[in-house]
Image (spheres, coloured by chain):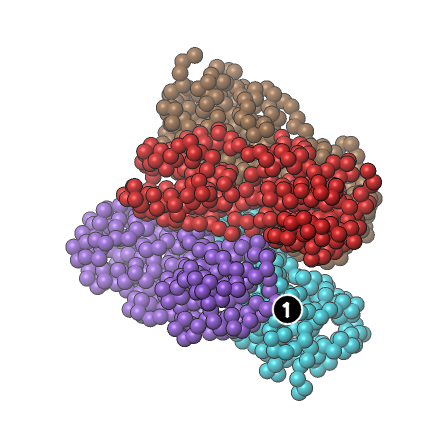
Chain colours: A cyan, B brown, C red, D purple
């Protein structure tokens, strides 16, 4: 295998806090190892539209603390076609890019996997998503920040939720995974969480209300993971209005602000470690792997595993929430 | 007029950050002046239900930084009836309360005014509302904090609003006043604000789009004041979908979190100054006045003026927003 | 007077949050008015070293929320000499710059005044300093953010100041003005402030201790303005150790972090309004003036007044602090 | 072994964010299990001075988000004597307390261990310290919050650190452990960290300067762990002034504010899980153990291990910092 001379880096899919810290680390680690770096704008789209420029260490100065991604991100329909990928590959060849680091979620890594196989290109992925729904890594880049953002929002809502008999349903992101809702509920002292992983097993709303979840409380806050399975906050509130009309229900949908903000310490450190590890992996001849972290150690997870498997919720957390909110 | 021996304090209506700082200042200023203080819980309701307790300086220790109100707040239908007010007055007499400080917005001060006239009770009001819609004071307690909260939320949304051709409508509070939306838009670098004060004069949405408000921008953010007049963010977005289908529209409703959070420095200082001034006013024989601030000086504003008049928007701000967002 | 075709903009002296918002507003207001804009880096130094580049609206995109100044700032000894100013003027001529907007504090505006007189150049100043020590404007750009930063730091220190008999002296900036210390003390619920404006009148420390400032308190926090007159936190602590050895004293010097951070809503709005007004003033033929704000209205203050006069402390605040901290 | 009927809970030593979340979880978990709970104020001191009161679920309402500890904390010399411990034990017996949960650091757990042995009392410890220096747990309660606080302070200092040739030394806490300094440096994008674990191996300052750590940078920030071994920020700055006089050095000591602030999501979740686990452990007959977390699983660590062993720094982090800051 020939040595890698130039690595392209891109962010794809929904953006996540810490992506800039990852871009910075990949760029500097590559330069440190004598490899040229090229930034590709707007995800896979920028490969096709040729929005590519060389990055020096200064290009990534003073970005570690910034939300979003300086490389932007976009969905790209063309890249889902063989013709689009051909065009993308041609551009990479023109730029002398012989390896890629892709930062993104499930969909982005799926794209990377197909591309890597079609063109025999070394690609390493970094798990960048606030949803924490990638298998093979304890946490993803952006998750801790989003969790803190949610918690701060719920803290504020609780400040004002003082009147009697109010029941707040707050919808948080998660793309069919309950990590943000469940941990957000524990962190904010909410009374309950309704998450897709449990929705199929039992009626969380009914149980919550039947066990008298708010006997001694003036107001209650329930976090609901956005998902067809849970029905979202609107769906749950609708049910309460019909089935438990005694409650004065309020709904709040946190929405897009959950993706933004300056990354937390944990996300910046994670992104930095993973960025350095991505370059190490490429130099080591690894390919088609996602960098993960397990028990505070960096691991390489084959794309096939990271994408295909569902990451389970730690069931201990359900008890911790139930008991601490009595 | 006999000297005041015991002052009751309550918070009423929608809560606002800084109410605790005001409670602290009123309590300590009264004690400093040799007057007893009684905290009344849940607004006017607590008078009727007799949720009243004496406050010492320690009762208000370590609350200046907390959002919400330790005295809680509630709507109270009974207090709108003469019978309810009679009951309330009886309880106050039982407790030896011979003057009141009421912290709240428009509706709360209207209640105070009626009660003061019926029972010839000295009452001083403090303007506590995030909406800033009280005449006779440059700012109200809670407004600055809510403005900062909105700004921080929009900052986060902007982090992620990087894709092409997206148009975000973010709904903020204001109760038919555009202060939060207009100043929030300037502070967050949003492209425009749709506010009720201007809705009647012209079609803000049409103008915004016709003047090519986003020629050189990838994404645009517009703040919309909640109001029947503006239609809210949902209403505006609906119109865009029908009339300007070329835009990819997103809606975010910030909701209840705008009322919460630790108060800003300005709100804490304002609340402290106003709380001290409220006690001074009572000692000075003032009654039926709201404490206001004008040009950094404390003023006494008759309830009649504060409630009846509409507070105008500073039109210079419209220019500042339009010009700074090109 | 010939029309202005190209305005140079620079930030000088100690940086302040909101400077970027001002740069953004000046740039866009000038372009809006058909005037070219050139950014000058590192204050007056950049004029001499020719670090000057044209600014388009995009150059100031997405900077309103950032602390510091994208134009950097530096002290410049050469500019204090006639030769240095000659060089600076020559460079401005080369670049076709026929007017300047200078954002900075006392020293920076003094430099602007001299330069304006020597070369008959239209210059408008914006008051950019966290110290709030410029006469003719109710507040300066950066002051509100610094005040909030100080308050948040003191909030944190108070969280941990729970043990008996501890007396914390926290030193804050101010450059011989007590605005940050006094208002910071009110906002954070501190027990007292030691500020230069009062130091000459009486012994603040002795009074504080003699009036039993902490009878019912477990721990006490006193803000001290950095200044030769106050002695700073270290100086005051030293005195306590000698004269009142019964107290367990702790010192914290907040230092440089007071200058940083994302600007508050008030600072961003103020900077935006002032930036727009600076361009208006230039177009209106104004020169040698600082833009100020008084009673929420923009005013033009001659440099001579802004620089020479001392801005007084509002004495009402001293009472508010004393009474609210009993 | 007889069943536990009443558990006492206390916080001891330096306070840490998240202690309140732990108090809340222990209280509610005990009540959930049918055990009575008594809060003991001011650490071990409150046992002796009899500052003990029963806690119901409401006593711990709305505290999860608050910094510091509602139970206060204090050093207690008497508890280090057999007589003091005898008095303490007598009081516990009077109150019917037959088990303890102690939240604190190294010193507090050492006290717990001695007391447990002398009086054969079931005691479970929770690791509450920002320093993260307890063996047997991946993280301690308070560490993540302190790390974020440090990062936010350094972010602010960096905003203003724009002039050429400045070298900032920022001292952070750690009590002879480098976790906060090293991870704080990575998270804030600082150029280097000087930590006690490495000080004995090599001259970190000399290496840093010799490897030209700041070739392409305008200003540099170095985090220094407080410690006799490192010399602290003052000690290092003094050395630079003597040995490398070409640098313009600035020092900032973050100080007590590092202990305060609303806890981060991670700390609240950790404290909640550990609090629930502490009651489980007591019910399970465990004693003289500290609750730890390893690989996201709760573990019981004998006091002897947790106290005696040094927790090592992950050496990978040194590389991550060095490479990402080129």
- What residue is at 43 percent from the left and 25 percent from the top? B8
Task: Left or right? Give the position of C296 relative to B40.
Answer: right
Q: Which residue lies furthest to the bottom in this view?
A: A1
- What residue is at 47 percent from the left and 55 percent from the top? D252
- Judged from the image, the secondary structure of the residue bearing numbered disc 1 is helix
- Between D112 and B152, the residue placed more toward the observer is B152
- What residue is at 73 percent from the left and 69 percent from the top? A53
**Count of numbered circles in the view:** 1
Give coordinates of residue D246: x percent, y percent.
53, 64
Give coordinates of residue D244: x percent, y percent.
49, 66
What is the chain identity of the residue bearing mark 1? Answer: A
Give coordinates of residue A246: x percent, y percent.
53, 40
- Between D116 and C159, the residue placed more toward the observer is C159
Task: Left or right? Give the position of B76 relative to D134.
Answer: right
Where does the N terminus of chain A fall, quadrant-wise? bottom right
| Residue D108: quarter of image | bottom left
Task: Left or right? Give the position of C69 relative to D251.
Answer: right
Q: Which residue lies furthest to the top in this view?
A: B1
| Residue B164: quarter of image | bottom right
Q: Is residue A256 visible?
A: no
Residue on which disc 1 sits: A57
Give coordinates of residue A100: x percent, y percent.
68, 75
Give the crowd class for mark 1: few <14, some 14-19, many >=20 residues within 10 Å.
many
- What residue is at 70 percent from the left and 82 percent from the top? A120
Q: Can residue B61 be seen in this view?
A: yes
């Amino acid at each position: 295998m020939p040595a890698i001379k130039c690595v392209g880096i891109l962010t794809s899919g929904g953006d996540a806090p810490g992506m800039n810290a990852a871009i910075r680390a990949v760029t500097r680690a590559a330069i440190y190892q004598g490899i040229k770096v090229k930034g590709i704008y707007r995800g896979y789209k920028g490969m096709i539209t040729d929005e590519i420029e060389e990055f020096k260490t200064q290009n990534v100065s003073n970005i570690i603390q910034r939300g979003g991604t300086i490389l932007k991100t976009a969905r790209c329909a063309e890249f889902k076609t063989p013709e689009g990928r051909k065009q993308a590959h041609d551009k990479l060849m023109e730029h002398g890019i012989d390896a890629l680091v892709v930062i993104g979620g499930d969909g982005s890594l799926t794209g990377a996997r197909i591309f890597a196989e079609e063109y025999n290109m070394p690609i390493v992925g970094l798990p960048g998503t606030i949803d924490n729904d990638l298998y093979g890594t304890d946490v993803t880049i952006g998750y801790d920040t989003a969790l803190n953002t949610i918690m701060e929002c719920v803290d504020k809502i609780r400040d004002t939720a003082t009147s009697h008999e109010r029941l707040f349903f707050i919808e948080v992101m998660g793309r069919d995974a309950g990590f943000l809702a469940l941990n957000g509920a524990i962190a904010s002292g909410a009374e309950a969480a309704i998450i897709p992983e449990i929705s199929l097993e039992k009626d969380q709303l009914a149980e919550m209300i039947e066990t008298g979840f708010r006997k001694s409380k003036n107001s209650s806050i329930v976090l609901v993971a956005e998902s067809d399975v849970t029905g979202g906050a609107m769906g749950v509130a609708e049910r309460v209005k019909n089935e438990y009309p005694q409650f004065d229900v309020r709904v709040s949908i946190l929405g897009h602000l959950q993706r933004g903000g300056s990354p937390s310490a944990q996300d910046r450190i994670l992104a930095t470690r993973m960025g350095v590890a991505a370059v190490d992996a490429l130099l080591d001849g690894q390919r088609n792997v996602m960098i993960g972290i397990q028990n505070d150690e960096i691991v390489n997870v084959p794309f096939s595993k990271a994408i295909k498997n569902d990451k389970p919720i730690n069931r201990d957390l359900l008890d911790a929430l139930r008991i601490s909110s009595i």
